[in-house]
């Protein structure tokens, strides 16, 4: 058991500190800001990088895209998605990353005002900067060209950094999504 008494599990020969995995996961979610989203449509698979903000319990990612973007059209036909996010310039190995799967839902008209507000407040905490980026809510309604989307995460994996440092094998460790809620 880790010295701090946190829960640990055995993965192969390794002890995996769950508290550390959860801490790394939360750090990535709060700081990465971009997720490369993978979707599938009639014309095949597609990957698109989107700027997200983190929503709390349950853990979800919120972003907006053009309605006619290939990934948006793909999600209208099949809401399943996967994605990856990463950060560089970190202590230790210098990077960290995660993979995710889930279901994407378009934000409906009833939830739109709240999601519009949250997206801009969380993405641009400085009021002056926010005003520079703020699009009117009409851009996201009716015939407007954009929509907000929420990825409801159902699975989350972290890079197995300890394994990489030990034997240079690139593996992932699943972290229970419920442990990532704010």
Image (tube, helix red, strand yellow):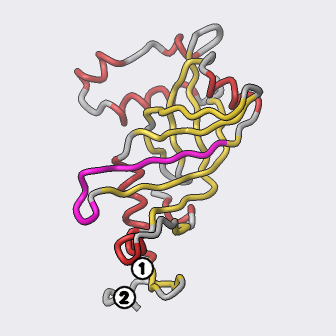
Whether the magenta-drawn stretch holds residue 83 is answered as yes
Q: Nearer the viewer, residue 65 or 55?
A: 65
Secondary structure at numbered mark 1: strand
Q: Where the C terminus falls, by quadrant?
A: bottom left
Contact (Cβ within 8 Å) of mark 2 with mark 1: yes
Q: Residues within 10 Å of mark 1 (few under 14, many from 20)?
A: some
Give the answer, above or below, for where 137 lies relative to 163: above
Q: Which mark is residue 17?
A: 1
Q: Alpha-carbon neighbours of circle 2 within 10 Å: few (<14), some, or many (≥20)? A: few
Q: Which mark is residue 2?
A: 2
**Image location (x, y in percent) of residue 111:** 59, 30
* Quarter of the rendering containing residue 150: top right
* Residue 56 screen position, x and y as percent: 48, 50
Asked if residue 61 lies left or right of residue 68, the reply is left
Q: Position of residue 47 (x, y in %)?
A: 57, 34
Q: Tell me which residue sits at (55%, 59%) in the image.
A: 156
In reply to whether residue 135 is colored magenta, the answer given is no
Q: Is residue 74 above or below residue 174?
A: above
Depth check, front residue: 33 or 15: 15
SS for tag 2?
loop
Q: Is residue 127 above or below residue 37?
A: above
Q: Position of residue 44 (x, y in %)?
A: 71, 31
Q: Which residues are magenta?
A: 81-93
Which residue is rendered at x = 24% and y = 51% of the image?
A: 89
What secondary structure predominates along the stretch shown in magenta? strand
Name the N-terminal-most of marks 2 and 1: 2
Q: Nearer the viewer, residue 173 or 19?
A: 173
Quarter of the image where the N terminus is located: bottom left
Residue drawn at x 39%, y 49% as measured from the top left? 86
Q: Quadrant of residue 122?
A: top left
Residue lying at 48% horizontally and 26% vertically, measured from the top left: 116
């Amino acid at each position: 058991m880790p010295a701090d008494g946190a829960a640990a599990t055995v993965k192969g020969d390794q002890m995996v500190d769950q508290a550390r995995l959860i801490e790394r996961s939360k750090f990535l979610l709060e700081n990465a800001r971009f997720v490369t989203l993978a979707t599938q449509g009639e014309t095949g698979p597609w990957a698109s990088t989107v700027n997200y903000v983190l929503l709390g319990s349950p853990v979800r990612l919120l972003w907006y895209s053009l309605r006619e973007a290939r990934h948006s059209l793909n999600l209208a036909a099949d809401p399943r998605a996967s994605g990856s996010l990463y950060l560089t310039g970190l202590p230790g190995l210098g990077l960290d990353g995660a993979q995710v799967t889930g279901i994407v839902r378009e934000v409906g008209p009833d939830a739109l005002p709240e999601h519009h507000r949250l997206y801009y407040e969380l993405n641009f905490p400085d009021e002056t900067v926010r005003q520079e980026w703020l699009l009117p809510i009409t851009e996201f309604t009716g015939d407007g060209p954009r929509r907000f989307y929420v990825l409801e995460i159902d699975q989350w994996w972290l890079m197995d950094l300890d394994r990489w440092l030990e034997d240079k094998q690139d593996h992932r460790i699943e972290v229970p999504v419920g442990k990532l809620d704010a």
